[in-house]
Image (spheres, grey):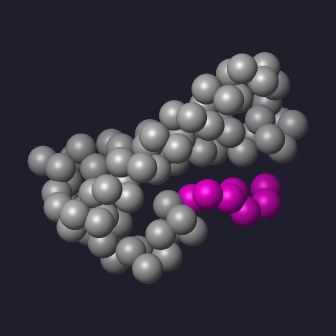
Amino acid sequence: MSHTPHELHDEFPHAAAQIHALKTQDKRFAALAERYHVLNREIHRIDSGIEPASEDRTEELKKERLSLLDRVQRTLAAGEMLS
């Protein structure tokens, strides 16, 4: 399979070390990052035509992904742990 776009390390290349640290040290951030990863992969499969989905479902998934991305960005900007 080709490269999956919108992975966290692609969205925040400057914060790779911070993301890794948060994922290993903060259970809630790790769960947030995992949900983002799973959701992003599902959207990629839909966009690639591998998995069928209605436009409404696809839009719903993309809105959730954006919400998760906003939460990750706020956490990185604050330099904080969620736990």
State whether the magenta stretch is mostly helix, strand or loop: loop
Q: Measuring from the top left, give residue 13's x and y in whole percent.
A: 49, 76
Q: Quadrant of residue 51?
A: top right
| Residue at 41% across, 74% down | 16
Quadrant where the N terminus lies?
bottom right
Q: Can residue 34 be seen by looking at this rendering? A: no
Q: Is residue 25 above or below residue 16?
A: above
Q: Measuring from the top left, give residue 8's x and y in whole percent.
A: 50, 61
| Residue at 77% across, 35% down | 46
Q: Quadrant of residue 44?
A: top right
Taking depth in this image into account, of 38 and 70 the one nearest to the observer is 70
Outermost left residue: 83
Instruction: Give the left or right position of residue 46, taking residue 6 as reference.
Output: right
Q: Is residue 6 above or below residue 65?
A: below
Q: Can residue 49 be seen by looking at this rendering? A: yes
| Residue at 68% across, 29% down | 59
Instruction: Give the left or right position of residue 8, taking residue 17 as reference.
Output: right
Taking depth in this image into account, of 79 and 32 the one nearest to the observer is 79
Instruction: Give the left or right position of residue 79, taking residue 56 as reference.
Output: left
| Residue at 73% across, 63% down | 3
Magenta stretch, residue numbers: 1-7
Q: Is residue 50 above or below residue 17?
A: above
Outermost right residue: 49
Say if the magenta span includes residue 5.
yes
